[in-house]
Image: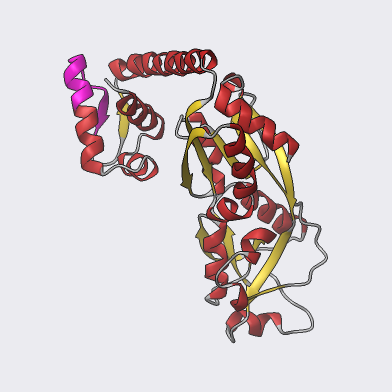
Amino acid sequence: MDIRSAQLFLHLASSLNYARTSEQMFVSPSTLTRVIQRLEEELGSSLFERDNRTVKLTTAGNRFQRFVRLWLDEWHQLQLDLQLASSELSGTLRIYCTVTASYSHLPALLDKFRLHCPKAEIQLSTGDAAQAIDRIKQDEADVAIAARPEQLPTTMYFQSIASLPVRLIAPVIPCRVNDLLAGAEVNWNEIPLILPEHGPARSRFDRWLKDCNINPAVVAKVDGHEALVSMVALGSGVSIVPDPVLQHSPVKERVRVLEHQYPFQPFDLGICMLAKRQQEPLIKSFWQLAQKS
């Protein structure tokens, strides 16, 4: 068993979804299947029970999951010990963030990090901000740039780097949405709304609907803030997004900000990581630079 196979197994053991693990771990479904089959051949036991609808761990799979977690922890500790013995830090730092954060906040952090750790290799992956905590917990990334969740796991550290205003946005193009918004008294129960699928944006949206007694006319649920702006730009409905996402969107000219009185809570953007990995040299260096930003 190699490190990559262990990481793939651990992710699948958590997601129990071959398609999701293939997508989030950037491997083809056939490659993932071969990796699991090879592990089962090496162990001489089935790790998963699979039918047309469900995937679940076998008894052997549960035991192997505990072993792999401990084994990867030992591997990280070995890397830490060897790096501490070296005069210059090297190795790979895996960073996860949204596409917007990759050019709005990450460059300034990486400029400083490269000066301190010129031999370090950066591995960047992008996706939905709501997945950041899971990516860290499943050992798919070392650090993430994301909005602070409503409930931060006790196993995670979070360092704030920016406060991001929330914008309520609507399309510019002539469409049914704008016809409904044109009246003197806007009936929000009739306005087509595009909901974030989950995460901090969804919790803010839900709080707005509850506080204003809105029975929403939901036309779509979307993963990722960038996709929300695109859906609004197409005339599908109204939604909310962090201000930097709107400002950096290639379709921002097709979107307008709606004036409103509701006090949306700003997004608390920051760096998150597992608390148990705080002393690993590359992670510690990146974390300390984030604290000074």
Relative to 212, is 174 on the left or the right?
A: left
Of residues 187 and 48, the one drawn nearer to the viewer in this rendering:
48
Relative to 128, is 1 on the left or the right?
A: left
Dividing the picture into quadrants, the one containing residue 159 is top right
Residue found farthest to the front: 87
Of residues 188 and 142, the one drawn nearer to the viewer in this rendering:
142
Relative to 40, is 107 on the left or the right?
A: right
Q: Residue drawn at (60%, 49%), measured in percent from left and top?
A: 107
- Would you say residue 190 is visible in this rendering? no
Q: Residue drawn at (55%, 61%), measured in percent from left and top?
A: 226
Vertical placement of residue 293 versus 49, above or below: below
Q: Residue drawn at (25%, 28%), measured in percent from left and top?
A: 49
Dividing the picture into quadrants, the one containing residue 75 is top left
Vertical placement of residue 185 versus 59, above or below: below
Q: In which quarter of the image is the N terminus?
A: top left
Check if residue 1 falls in the magenta segment.
Answer: no
Check if residue 42 falls in the magenta segment.
Answer: yes
Of residues 247 and 66, the one drawn nearer to the viewer in this rendering:
247
Dividing the picture into quadrants, the one containing residue 6 is top left
Q: Position of residue 220 (x, y in %)?
A: 51, 64
Of residues 57 and 95, the one drawn nearer to the viewer in this rendering:
95
Q: Residue drawn at (19%, 28%), measured in percent from left and top?
A: 37
Magenta segment range? 38-50
Vertical placement of residue 177 versus 200, above or below: below
Q: In which quarter of the image is the C terminus?
A: top right
Question: How many labels sit on residues?
Answer: 0
- Would you say residue 7 is visible in this rendering? yes
